[in-house]
Amino acid sequence: MKIGILGSGGIGGSLGRLWTAAGHEVMFASRHPENLVSLKIKAGANAQIGSLAEAAEFGEVILEAVPFCAVPTMPVGKLKGKTVLSASNYYPSRDGNIDLKGKSQSEWVAEHLPEARIVKAFNMMEAGVMELLADGQGREGLAIMIAGDDEAAKLIAKQLVVDAKFQAVDLGVLAQGRVFQAPDAPLYDVQLTPDEVYVHLKRQENNS
């Protein structure tokens, strides 16, 4: 599978390395692709680098890992009909004041990428955990929560979660992304097995 990675920092860079190791082709992209040469070398022969627009065109699937405030600047036309895994998080101190209009963060992303098939995924896991796995270390099989309205897109997301050495936990429609969005949702920034996810949610409900 060809995967375009829009935003090649801690999350995008590590996932790209995991996916190339699993046999996928990856194009890393950022606003300054010339700074990604060392990442390309680490990722190996299945990796290349390009601009955000080039990666959006290259990928059959897209990982969106840009700062939340940068989502509206993405190459919308090139994402039409594509599965987009949304890993961005809204941090007001970094992104400024954004009116989500009562939507979850992932629904807001979908509003700005209206013809893409959005699946919220990978935003809730620490980049350092992913980097350890990419380095051949760390703990495999931790849960990655996903949410989306398109079942076919979620199937693709689930496979890519497995290929990145995690396990996918489908929490339902895109609005359910609230459960694992930054900064203080119950399943944000947690390292749990799939079985532990539901225990954790139940405990949160009982304490609320």
Image (tube, grey):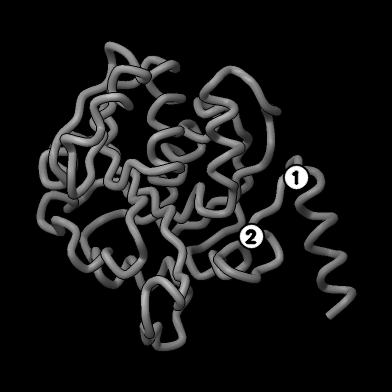
Image quadrant holding the N terminus, namely top left
Left or right side of 44 for 82: left
Query: Residue type at mark 1?
Result: Leu
Work out whether residue 169 or residue 149 is closer to the camera in this orientation and state it. 169
Which residue is located at x 21 percent, y 60 percent? 115
Regarding mark 2 in the picture, which secondary structure is present there?
A: loop
Kindly indicate the quadrant of the structure image that contains residue 178: bottom right
| Residue that carries the numbered disc 2 in the rendered image | 188
Where is residue 155 shown, x and y percent of the image? 46, 39
Distance from disc 1 to disc 2, alpha carbons, whole Å, reads: 11 Å
Q: Is residue 148 above or below residue 142?
A: below
Please identify the residue farthest to the top as the structure is shown.
45
Image quadrant holding the C terminus, namely bottom right
| Residue that carries the numbered disc 1 in the rendered image | 192
Kindly indicate the quadrant of the structure image that contains residue 19: top left
Which residue is located at x 33 percent, y 27 percent? 39
Work out whether residue 180 or residue 33 is closer to the camera in this orientation and state it. 33
Where is residue 29 shown, x and y percent of the image? 22, 40
Kindly indicate the quadrant of the structure image that contains residue 140: top right
Query: Residue type at mark 2?
Result: Tyr
Q: Is residue 95 above or below residue 188?
A: below
